[in-house]
Amino acid sequence: MNTITKDVFLIDKVKHKEKAEWIRRIIRSQIGVFKISVDTSTMLMTVEYDPDAISPSTMQTLIRSVGCDLIIDKVEIHQILQQKRKFRRNIYFFAVATVVFLLSFISGNIYIEIAGGLIFVLFLSLMVKKQRKLFTYLPLL
């Protein structure tokens, strides 16, 4: 009896949307794959497949053969996506801190300039301290 399984995987080490589309075509051409979609903004691949005909590890091997990776472990996918969200959030906060820092020099008030500089340095040090390992996921952005 054929059962259809629906899983979500993360495509890793892909820098271009065209390559993600190419990976989608590779997986779609396999026997046992019924439906596949790739969200190119998050690089999440949703696959409906027959687990008796093709396994996630087989899909992972196919994708690794073209120089990319397929993360099939749900916990690891969740951790990577959570780290990417934190990294993006910190980039936004860094941009705001930079604007505050730059605007503090326009005010002409030495106390505002010092406060702006302290905010900028404090945020920068926190971001580097907490997110140092996230720079390995920069290509996923």
Image (tube, rainbow, N blue to C red):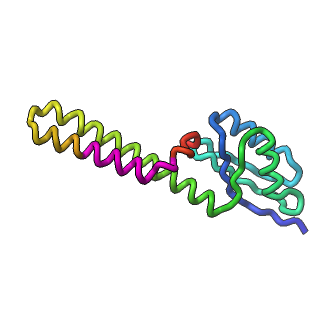
What residue is drawn where x is 70% and y is 47%?
A: 37
Q: Does 131 appear in magenta? A: yes
Q: How many marks do you count on the picture?
A: 0
Q: Does 79 appear in magenta? A: no
Q: Nearer the viewer, residue 18 or 108?
A: 108
What residue is drawn where x is 78% and y is 57%?
A: 56
Residue 109's place in the image compared with 27, above or below, is: above
Q: Main secondary structure of the magenta part?
A: helix
Residue 125 left/right relative to 88: left
What residue is drawn where x is 40% and y is 43%?
A: 91
Q: Nearer the viewer, residue 43 or 35?
A: 43
The stretch in magenta equals 119-134
Residue 38 left/right relative to 132: right
- Where residue 110 appears, as percent x and y from the top left, is 10, 37
Quadrant (top left, top right, bottom left, bottom right) of the C terminus: top right
Quadrant (top left, top right, bottom left, bottom right) of the N terminus: bottom right
Residue 12's place in the image compared with 47, above or below, is: above
- Where residue 41 appears, as percent x and y from the top left, is 57, 43
Residue 140 left/right relative to 115: right
Q: Residue furthest left?
A: 109
- Where residue 126 appears, as percent x and y from the top left, is 36, 51
Residue 15: image quadrant is: top right
- Where residue 71 appears, as percent x and y from the top left, is 69, 53
Q: Residue furthest bottom?
A: 1
